Image (spheres, rainbow, N blue to C red):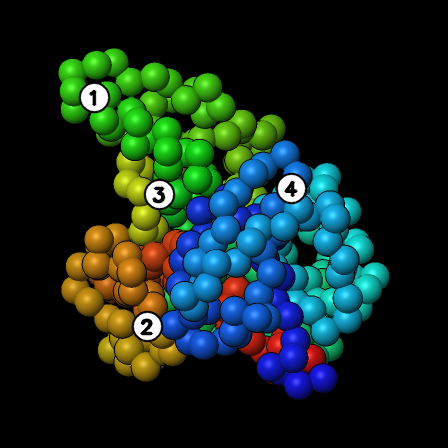
Amino acid sequence: MSEAARELIIVGVDNAAFGPLLEVLEEREIISAEQLSLLETEEREVDPQVFANRNIPVEPLEKFTFSDGQVVILLSSGAAVEAAMAAAENSGAWVVDVANNTRGDESVALVHPLFNGGELATAERRVVALPSAGAAMVVDALAPLKGKLQALEVQLNQPVSALGKSAIDAMAAQTARMFSGQDAEIDPEIGHRLAFNQLSACEAVLASGHTLSELTLVHDLRRLFGSDTAIDAGINTVSVFHGQLANLGVVLNEDVDLDKVRALLANGAGLKMVEQPSAEDAVGSDVTLIGRLRQSLLSKRQLNLCAVSDNLRKDVAINCAQTAHLLLKNY
């Protein structure tokens, strides 16, 4: 079957990454409007979406028939999505899970298209998962140092958009109320105000002291960098809509040569070295910004740096589009 005859199915129109994904697919001309189908669960009524100057209807997920030759991107989760994932795989379609529907399932390959995209050829199943946005950014930032890593500590400052579209809407409403002199309502699911705030955790803390998102970040990075690299992570939520920033403590298997490391990072695919990277500079960009590179005061083998990226466009939408393109073209 030719690439032009294949179909791309997107499940989860109400996801925060949906808009950026459509933009990337159209900008890069990965598919035509005739190849695209949009699905959402029956309880959600969603208006048609514009793609390549065409109105694409949003069909009910539960009534859709999957078939061989399709690539299905899952941007949402839940029982109906899991049932659809099983139906799609059984039909011979490829499934790209972006919403942790396959969390903990080691039979599902974890694929970053520019880091280990070759694993698609040897995948055990026709279901692959993409790393979380935070993990994707860290992998981009440290890919030039692969094979040199001994340990890694990630302190990720994630934006409110990492929590989903409802959190974006909630912070926008809280911001508007506060600017008009009114009290902002506390988000009932998070238990804290999102606007003008910084949260040490936005979900339940487990017995280990980590949150599930932190353990997911660690798990993704261990699978991608290898179990020989010791990894720990913390995630804070900051009061910005888009753009994530991570401070990275990297322990190498040899003494740090800053000039050598700087040269490796400067030549890394999709990386741009800047003196003081900021989330504002990263939003809307297709690159990961790297800066604040310095020798740690704790060890001659440790260096510290900062990585910044657009969490929705760069680390979800582009990775989705590139993975879908590989599958449509080669598999």
Residues at marks 1 and 2 touching, judged by CB atoms closer than 8 Å:
no
* Residue found at x 57% / y 65%: 36
* Vertical relation: 262 (above or below) 282: below
- What is the spatial separation of the Cα atoms under label 4 and label 2, in whole angstroms? 37 Å
Q: Please identify the quarter of the rendering in which residue 78 is found.
A: top right
In this rendering, the label closer to the viewer, 1 or 2: 1
Q: Is residue 15 left or right of residue 261?
A: right
The residue to which callout 3 is attached is 159
Q: Secondary structure at mark 2?
A: strand
The residue to which callout 4 is attached is 41
Tell which circle, 4 or 3, labels the residue nearer the N-terminal end. Answer: 4
In this rendering, the label closer to the viewer, 3 or 1: 1
- For badge 2, the amino acid type reads Leu
* Residue found at x 58% / y 30%: 206
- What is the spatial separation of the Cα atoms under label 3 and label 1, in whole angstroms? 19 Å
The residue to which callout 1 is attached is 178
The residue to which callout 2 is attached is 271
Does any portion of residue 143 appear in the rendered image?
Answer: yes
Tell which circle, 4 or 1, labels the residue nearer the N-terminal end. Answer: 4
Q: Secondary structure at mark 3?
A: loop
Horizontal and vertical percent position of residue 70? 69, 69
Relative depth, front residue between 172 and 212: 172
Horizontal and vertical percent position of residue 312? 41, 54
Tell which circle, 3 or 1, labels the residue nearer the N-terminal end. Answer: 3
Q: Secondary structure at mark 1?
A: helix
